Image: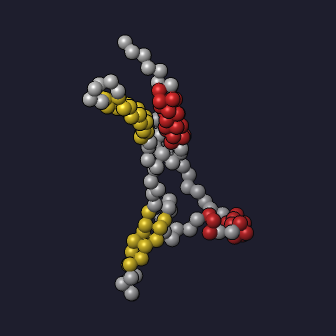
Amino acid sequence: MLHVDLSKLAGGELQAKFDREITKVIENMKDPNTPYQEARSITIKISLKQTELRDDAKVDISVNSKLAGVISAKTNFAIGKDLNSGEVLIQEYGKQIPGQMTFTDISPEELKTESQADSKKVTSMPRALRVNG
């Protein structure tokens, strides 16, 4: 049986190509913008083509990797129509309903004023129902 030291094949070029591809694969695996569950792979292809006299062979060595693609960005558009002009309108929105107020829409001073005004109001709470079990 023949023994070929792959790390020395083509003057170490196979090893260098493999090292380059494994680095790409590991970087791709560590990238949070790629799906974690997708498999990555490295393919080493060695092609041998002999001459007619069968005393010489051309060897072609290639190393390729298959990486996971980048996760796509997602967003939402609210789509509507201006009933007066007929113009189509769109607005991007995230985790909240378009037009809904957020905490960043209110200044800290407004929150203080509103909470002080609310603290002077008395609200009666209904008694809790007790269930006998």
Q: Quadrant of residue 53?
A: top left
Q: Nearer the viewer, residue 100 or 123?
A: 100
Q: Nearer the viewer, residue 127 or 15?
A: 15
Q: Report x, y in % for residue 18.
A: 49, 33
Q: Quadrant of residue 113?
A: bottom right
Q: Report x, y in % for residue 97.
A: 48, 65
Position of 72 relative to 21 (above/below): below
Q: Residue at x 73, y 69 (%)?
A: 109
Residue furthest to the top: 1
Q: Quadrant of residue 39?
A: top left
Q: Is residue 60 left or right of residue 128?
A: left
Position of 25 relative to 111 (above/below): above
Q: Report x, y in % for residue 94.
A: 50, 61
Q: Residue at x 56, y 68 (%)?
A: 101
Position of 44 relative to 126 (above/below): above
Q: Residue at x 45, y 57 (%)?
A: 74
The answer to whether residue 39 shows anywhere in this view is no
Q: Is residue 57 left or right of residue 21?
A: left
Residue furthest to the bottom: 84
Is the N terminus in the top left, top right, bottom left or bottom right quadrant? top left
Q: Residue at x 30, y 30 (%)?
A: 51
Q: Nearer the viewer, residue 23 or 32?
A: 23
Q: Report x, y in % for residue 80.
A: 39, 75
**In the rendered view, how is the structure colored?**
secondary structure
Q: Is residue 33 left or right of residue 85?
A: right
The answer to whether residue 52 shows anywhere in this view is yes
Q: How many marks?
A: 0
Residue furthest to the front: 53
Q: Nearer the viewer, residue 119 or 114?
A: 114
